[in-house]
Image: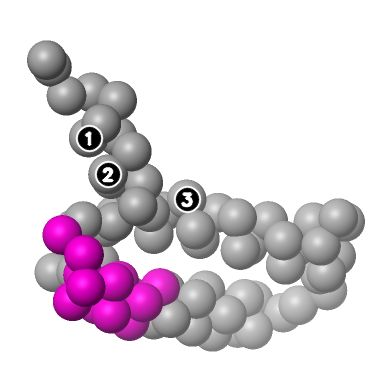
Amino acid sequence: MKPAGKMSLTIYISQSVITAWIFSSWGLGLFQELQTWQVLILAFGIWLFLANLATIWLNRFKQGPLEKVMNVLTRSR
């Protein structure tokens, strides 16, 4: 949970992009095609994937990519 918290912005935006791609017409177009239990399993699977990716990323880098961008944009000089 700690790596996912350190990369919360990256995970949040990544989840949004992945689910938009899965459910929108420009992606797989699965909106209203899956049952509720399938969507819950899918959402949990996406979160587990991204949480594991965050762990791997933070073993190599200090912070997530979007967190780095926000740091650069908001750092006072």
**Quick check: 20 above or below 44?**
above
Residues 76 and 5: in front is: 76
Residue 31 at least partly seen: no
Judge whether residue 51 is colored magenta: yes
Name the kind of residue labelled 2 in the image: Lys
Residue 73 vs residue 47: left or right?
left
User: Which residue is found at the position 49% from the left and 83% from the top?
Assistant: 45
Secondary element at image label 1: helix
Looking at the rendered image, the disc whose residue lies closer to the viewer, 3 or 2, is 2
Q: Earlier in the sequence, mark 3 or mark 1?
A: 3
Residue 40 vs residue 32: left or right?
left
Q: Quadrant location of residue 54?
A: bottom left
User: Which residue is found at the position 13% from the left and 69% from the top?
Assistant: 2
Distance from disc 3 to disc 1, alpha carbons, whole Å, reads: 16 Å
Magenta segment: 50-62
Residue 68's mark?
Answer: 2
Distance from disc 3 to disc 2, alpha carbons, whole Å, reads: 14 Å
**Quick check: 28 above or below 48?**
above
Residue 13's mark?
Answer: 3
**Quick check: 68 above or below 29?**
above
Residue 25 in the image: x percent, y percent?
Answer: 88, 56
Secondary element at image label 3: helix
Distance from disc 1 to disc 2, alpha carbons, whole Å, reads: 5 Å
- Magenta segment's dominant SS is helix
Q: Are marks 1 and 2 in contact (CB under 8 Å)?
A: yes
Residue at numbered disc 1: 71
Residues 75 and 45: in front is: 75
Judge whether residue 31 is colored magenta: no
